[in-house]
Image (cartoon, helix red, strand yellow):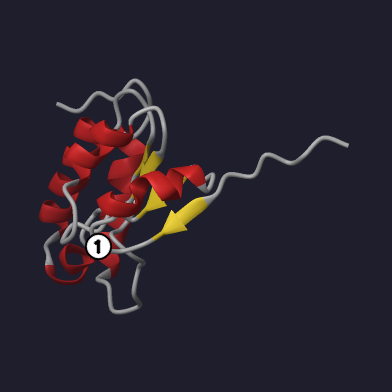
Amino acid sequence: MPRARIPLIYHTDGNILEVLEAIQDAGVNAIHPVDPTGMDIYDFKQCVAGKLCVIGNVDVDLLLRGTPAEVEAETKKHLQRLGPGGGYILGSSNSIPRTCKIENYRIMLETTRRYGVYPIRIN
């Protein structure tokens, strides 16, 4: 019987560069959420391009305290810079806490639906 090919997503915070090789050797397929206080997601995606999928990084603090316009701008920036070439899934930098402004969460989702389709085109 063939083995199921189930992707393995590793959730971690902070800077994981020192243990990145061990994470890859363990068969991990994706890293969530690429903590914005620990690593630069743009540099990290270049480092793991073609090896790991990168997930998340829209700062939870922005979702809690920012404006919808700020969330939309950050979402577009992530899609524009991280989407081309694949290997990126937009999401928050951790989870969506119940204290998150619902309008900020909605605008993140709506912006992703609008601009997160290949080929990525954001004006």
Vertical comparison of 120 with 28: above or below: above
Whole-percent x, y for residue 89 in the image = 38, 42
Q: Which residue is mark 1?
A: 14
Q: Is residue 75 left or right of residue 73?
A: right
Vertical comparison of 60 with 99: above or below: above
Q: Going 13% across and 45% down the picture, which residue do you hit?
A: 73
Q: Secondary structure at mark 1?
A: loop
Numbered disc total: 1
Q: Quadrant of residue 84?
A: top left
Q: Going 25% across and 62% down the picture, which residue do you hit?
A: 14
The quarter in which the C terminus is drawn is: top left
Using the rendered image of the protein, determine whether residue 76 is visible from the camera's viewpoint. Answer: no
Q: Residue furthest right?
A: 1
Whole-percent x, y for residue 112 in the image = 32, 42
Q: Quadrant of residue 76?
A: top left
The quarter in which the N terminus is drawn is: top right
Q: Which amino acid type is marked by label 1? A: Gly
Q: Residue furthest bottom?
A: 99
